[in-house]
Amino acid sequence: MKRACRILCVDDEDFNLDLLESLLVPNGFETFTAQDGKRAMEIIGRKNIDLVLLDINMPIMNGHEVCRAIKSNPETSHIPVIMITSLDSKENRMKGMEAGAEEFLPKPIDLPELLLRVKNILRATEFEDAFNYVIHALARAAEANDVDTGNHILRVGEFAALLARELGQSEKFIEDIRAQATLHDVGKVHIPSHILKKPGKLDEAEMDEMRKHPTFGAMIIGDHPHLEMGRRIALCHHERWDGTGYPNGISGEAIPLEARISSVADCYDALRASRVYKPNYDHTGAVKTLLEGDGRMMPAHFDPRVLEAFSRLVPQFEALYDKMKDS
Ligand SMILES: [Fe+2]
């Protein structure tokens, strides 16, 4: 059975918490309550919360600080936040927007409106989950002919998200790249299995065939506006900053940023993995190869800004790889 959606209500006044619970519980929601921001953060860390209703004026951490803490943690940034503000507080709304809140509701609370907003937000989140699920299913389908690459595609999404955050990209960009970088190799579904699984080096004809996977990937993803980023990543993740990549040999900023980021994420993970055609590197070896080159892979292949961001994130890459490594 599907579990009830979990809503955390945060307010320092009992009266308001009781009011929210009396509305939400009969409508099938499971509620948690906190009277200050610190307690709210503890519950968010433990309870798989689906949505937060957040008052602004509270002791210890105010609503804006709580919202900022939720939105700046990659593990909780997806949780929607509705801030409850006083009627005349434009400034509070602006601060809330800056902190990343999705919605605002004025006080005194209009209960029917609150219920509608909660339902709408949760429906949108459910749609997004389903969309991301289908993206991953498509990415997985492309592995049918390939060697077992384990969690490679998921790790590339997470590494790309880490880099995007370090480069100061928006939450929307970060969430899109996390989901859609997993599609980078979807075009491999058209590459014959004997090429993908060949031990040792590919000959020229096989390499030519292999170089078609970005174009195939872009064709498979097509031109849906919600998948534009995935399409650009699939098409351009083997392009190089110095113009020596494929399929189009474009260079520098002509390569979309999301593809420049995914390229570093993909190369780090590919270096760590052992494959029939190559041994694996440990973390230190992979970092050294990316930052200093080994003759085949060279720093000039990557956007220097992305490579710099990578060099600042070296410990996080190691921790994330260990957390998501194939058993
Ligand atoms: Fe690829």
Image (cartoon, rainbow, N blue to C red):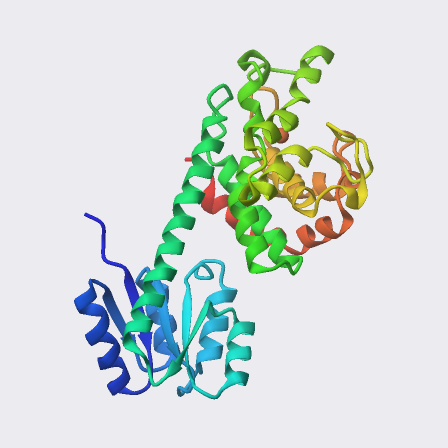
Residue 211 position by quadrant:
top right
- Give above or below for 312 relative to 152: below
Residue occupying the point 57% across, 33% down? 222
Residue occupying the point 38% across, 76% down? 54
Q: Considering depth in this image, is 49 or 155 the residue closer to the camera? A: 49
Horizontal relation, residue 256 to residue 123: left or right: right
Q: Is residue 318 visible?
A: no
Q: Considering depth in this image, is 264 or 140 the residue closer to the camera? A: 140
User: In x, y percent, where is residue 311?
Assistant: 69, 52
Picture quadrant of ligand 1? top right
User: In x, y percent, where is residue 75?
Assistant: 45, 58
- Give above or below for 189 relative to 297: above
Q: Name the quarter where the C terminus is drawn.
A: top left
Residue 37 position by quadrant:
bottom left
Q: Considering depth in this image, is 142 or 102 the residue closer to the camera? A: 102
Q: Is residue 197 visible?
A: yes
User: In x, y percent, where is residue 149?
Assistant: 50, 29
User: In x, y percent, where is residue 166?
Assistant: 64, 58
